[in-house]
Amino acid sequence: MASPQKKLQGLVAATITPMTENGEINFSVIGQYVDYLVKEQGVKNIFVNGTTGEGLSLSISERRLVAEEWVTRGKNKLDQVVIHVGALSLKESQELAQHAAEIGADGIAVIAPFFLKPWTKDVLINFLKEVAAAAPALPFYYYHIPALTGVKIRAEELLNGIQDKIPTFQGLKFSDTDLLDFGQCVDQNRQQQFAFLFGVDEQLLSALVMGATGAVGSTYNYLGKKTNQMLEAFERKDFSLALNYQFCIQRFINFVVKLGFGVSQTKAIMTLVSGIPMGPPRLPLQKASREFTENAEAKLKSLDFLSFTGLKDGNLEACS
Ligand SMILES: CC(=O)N[C@H](C=O)[C@@H](O)[C@H](O)[C@H](O)CO
Ligand SMILES: CC(=O)C(=O)O
């Protein structure tokens, strides 16, 4: 049974799946990647095979191997490894859930099936329940990302009575900007020990105010340290400092969003910041342009987000 004492909190990096130039998974850098997250970014939880990890673009056997590698490399280094096991086929999802349990992952997460879609809360719950039942000892998280799945069933509605149907339900990863829905998830479940993990990195501070207990995101791969400073300021109730950090992070995200920002660009930025080659994305995604990477690098430098730049005099926008 899911153990509530091991609550998932703080930052969770949505891991990138490193690839070689010819499109194969580059397992050889995952050990280095774990060390980078822990030592350089202060991030000790990961979310594997999600959006950022191109989980839905990998084969089932690749997803199993990737999950295994992260669990193995993360042993005694990471606090929690959550595996995203969502798939269009219930069978595949169950296979991945069972596999996550076998390899000793700390939790599983599932998105709504997004081709033939569930149209009501009850149908979605039934799908999630069947997946969760394949890993009855693992904490289960629902991954709400309506913009990508097209399944717009409100999270607040879904959470109502969910533990009666899914006893392992432990929390929600909420990747949407609807803070009414998010706030009501928190408000209506105060007596539970659920994890409320926010997934829109540029708005995390507002979600913290609404009661988020943690965050899962792509930018924590390389802005984990900055975001942790924001979390610390928030904890100390130094809200103006926390806002400074959030604005600083927003300046970067706003800049790259205007250039076109997605998983491909995340791979390029992470390669640049960490020095670990993440490689190209897999089709249908396309590699970020050189121009994008150069612009992103200049912005990272001006914000002093690249620790090794040594350009202290020039960084006009750098934050506290
Ligand atoms: C759609 C998507 O990938 N969302 C990510 C996680 O949910 C976020 O971490 C974003 O990448 C981030 O907030 C930047 O927009
Ligand atoms: C951002 C996130 O949570 C994901 O990549 O799945």
Image (tube, grey):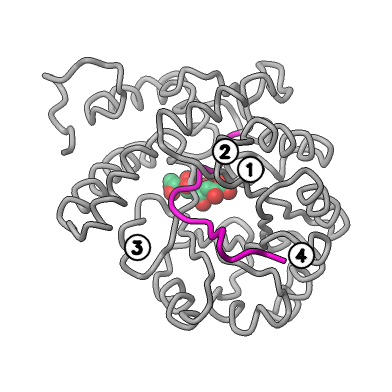
Location of residue 118 with respect to 140 vertically, above or below: below
The earlier-in-sequence mark between 3 and 4 is: 4
Q: Are marks 3 and 1 in contact (CB under 8 Å)?
A: no
The earlier-in-sequence mark between 3 and 1 is: 1
Name the residue tied to disc 2: 15
Name the residue tied to disc 4: 132
User: Is residue 170 located in the magenta-colored stretch of the structure?
Assistant: no
Marks 2 and 3 sit apart, C-alpha to C-alpha, by: 22 Å
Query: Which is nearer the eye, 200 or 293?
Result: 200
Q: SS class of the residue under badge 1? A: strand
Q: SS class of the residue under badge 3? A: helix
Q: SS class of the residue under badge 4? A: helix
Q: SS class of the residue under badge 2? A: loop
Residue at position x 19%, y 48% in the image = 244
Residue at position x 18%, y 32% in the image = 318
The earlier-in-sequence mark between 2 and 3 is: 2
Kind of residue indicated by mark 4:
Ala
Marks 4 and 2 sit apart, C-alpha to C-alpha, by: 22 Å
Q: Give coordinates of residue 161: x percent, y percent.
A: 63, 84
Give the quarter of the figure containing the C terminus: top left
Name the residue tied to disc 1: 48
Marks 3 and 4 sit apart, C-alpha to C-alpha, by: 28 Å
Judge: label 2 CB < 8 Å from ligand 2: yes
The earlier-in-sequence mark between 4 and 2 is: 2
**Stretch in magenta:** 1-16
177 left or right of 69? Answer: left
Q: Are marks 2 and 3 in contact (CB under 8 Å)?
A: no
In this rendering, the label closer to the viewer, 4 or 2: 4
Q: Give coordinates of residue 240: x percent, y percent.
A: 15, 55
236 left or right of 139? Answer: left
Residue at position x 56%, y 43% in the image = 46
